[in-house]
Amino acid sequence: MWQTVAGQGLVYALYGAGAAFALHFVLWQIKLEGAGDAKLMMAVGAFCGWQTMLEATWWRYVLLVPYALVTITVLGRWQNFKAAVMWTYMKATGMDVGERPEPKYMPFGPLIALAVPAALYTDWLDFFAP
């Protein structure tokens, strides 16, 4: 009755959602992603399996650099990016830098939407294959 994309049953879906929760809860806790991203990846784990979820996570971070460059350019946030990089550098070298620049967040939903098909339809990471 219940089938995932991989043709498995409910237990397989629960494994995928559980693995996604274990990984993406940690990524959310260390602020590498938002809570919505973690929940979306749990859905990917449930519907596509834990192997595809792991590969989609890898693809998401591979696609992050070009996506970030395009997003920063299109939204005109280069000044904020430069200020944040300079603040981080000066803080790391021990200088008194004052207030942190206001953070600007990028939407990661479109990036996940690109990463999941890349994980499903490429064979670049076959070591995660079921």
Image: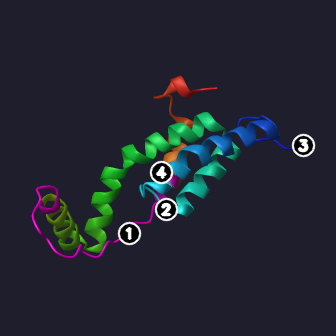
Q: Viewer-nearest of labels 3 and 4?
A: 4
Front position in the image: 113 or 50: 50
Relative placement, left or right, of 98 versus 62 is left
Q: Residue at x 67, y 40 (%)?
A: 16
Q: Between marks 4 and 1, how big is the CA–CA gap?
A: 16 Å
Tag 3, which secondary structure? loop
Residue 48 inside the magenta-drawn segment: no
Write down the residue under mark 2: 34
| Amino acid at dot 4 | Leu
What's the magenta region? 90-112
Percent from the top left, x then y, of residue 106?
A: 39, 66
Residue 105's mark? 1
- Which amino acid type is shown beneath numbered disc 1? Tyr
Image coords of residue 35 (percent x, y): 54, 62
Give how far apart the Cα atoms at labels 2 and 1 are: 10 Å
**Amino acid type for the residue under numbered disc 3:** Met
Mark 2 or mark 4, earlier in chain: 4
Secondary structure under the numbered disc 1 in the rendered image:
loop
**Residue at disc 4, secondary structure:** helix
Which of pointers 1 and 3 lies earlier in the amino acid sequence?
3
Give percent across and percent down for residue 119. Answer: 53, 39
**Are the residues tagged 2 and 1 within 8 Å (C-beta)?**
yes
Q: Which residue is mark 3?
A: 1
What's the magenta bit mostly, secondary-structure-wise? loop
Toward the viewer: 44 or 104? 104
Instruction: Tell me which label, 2 or 1, sits earlier in the chain.
Output: 2
Q: Pointers 3 and 4 in contact (CB under 8 A)? A: no
SS of the residue under disc 2 = loop
Query: Which colour scheme appears in the figure?
Result: rainbow
Q: Are marks 1 and 3 in contact (CB under 8 Å)?
A: no
Kindly identify which residue carries mark 4. Answer: 27
12 lies above or below 24? above
